[in-house]
Amino acid sequence: MDTFTSDRGGSEVLKFNNNGTFMEKWGAYGSGAKQFVRPHAIAFDSKDYMYITDMGNSRVQKFDKNGTFILTWGSYGTGKDLFSGSIPGIAVDSKGFVYVIDRLESRIQKFDGIGTLKAMWGSKGSSLGELNKPEDIAINNKTGEVFITDTQNSRVQVFHIE
């Protein structure tokens, strides 16, 4: 199984084989297809589509496992379907829904695989269910639990997906 990592400074995605040998890189600095400004998190769905948070462009880009560009969604802003410019975490559940953390807005947005917003939750605060600069996300598909690192509140919060 190949491993992919983002190079935020180089605006590239790097691919390594299962022995850790570098295989290829792709991407460049910019705002077009297959271009990035601070790529960050990478997640795969069950069909091997790759989703990458492009923090500097406030968007998510979708690729096939060979790095062929499929589509993009999102832009800068604070409303629905928009990202604040700090989207460090992404995960995909077993049904193909894509969860994106918006750190500065202290929320999570849930999309289908083509970028249609399906749900959104979270607001800034320290009470149960509130977030303060969440950083990462993980999903347990067996239990339906979503784990969010709630960085500034020094905790991990657990939510249930429907």
Image: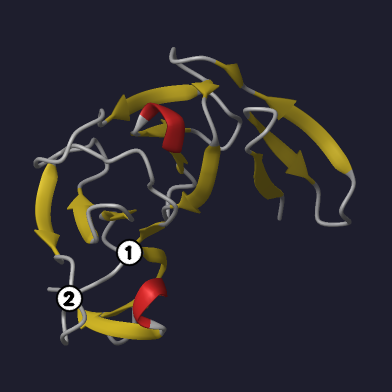
Report the front residue among 94 and 82: 82
* Residue 58 in view, yes or no: yes
| Mark in front: 1 vs 2 | 2
Query: For residue 130, which numbered disc appears in the image?
Result: 2
> Closer to the camera, 84 or 159?
84
Query: The C terminus is located in which quarter?
Result: bottom left
Residue 145 at x, y = what percent? Answer: 28, 82
According to the picture, the residue beneath numbered tag 1 turns out to be 93
Q: Are marks 1 and 2 in contact (CB under 8 Å)?
A: no
Residue 121 lies, in percent from the top left, at: 12, 64
Label 1, label 2: how far apart the Cα atoms are? 22 Å
**Relative to 12, 79 lies left or right:** left
Front residue of 44 and 53: 53
Q: Residue at x 45, y 35 (%)?
A: 54
Task: Kindly indicate the quadrant of the structure image that contains residue 9.
Answer: top right
The kind of residue tagged 2 is: Glu
The residue depicted at 72 percent of the width and 37 percent of the height is 14
> In the picture provided, is 83 more to the left or to the right than 16?
left
Question: Which of marks 2 and 1 precedes in the sequence?
Answer: 1
- Tell me if residue 14 comes above or below residue 123 in the rendering: above
**Is residue 31 depicted above or below 11 in this figure?**
above
For label 1, the SS is loop
Q: Residues within 10 Å of mark 1 (few under 14, many from 20)?
A: some
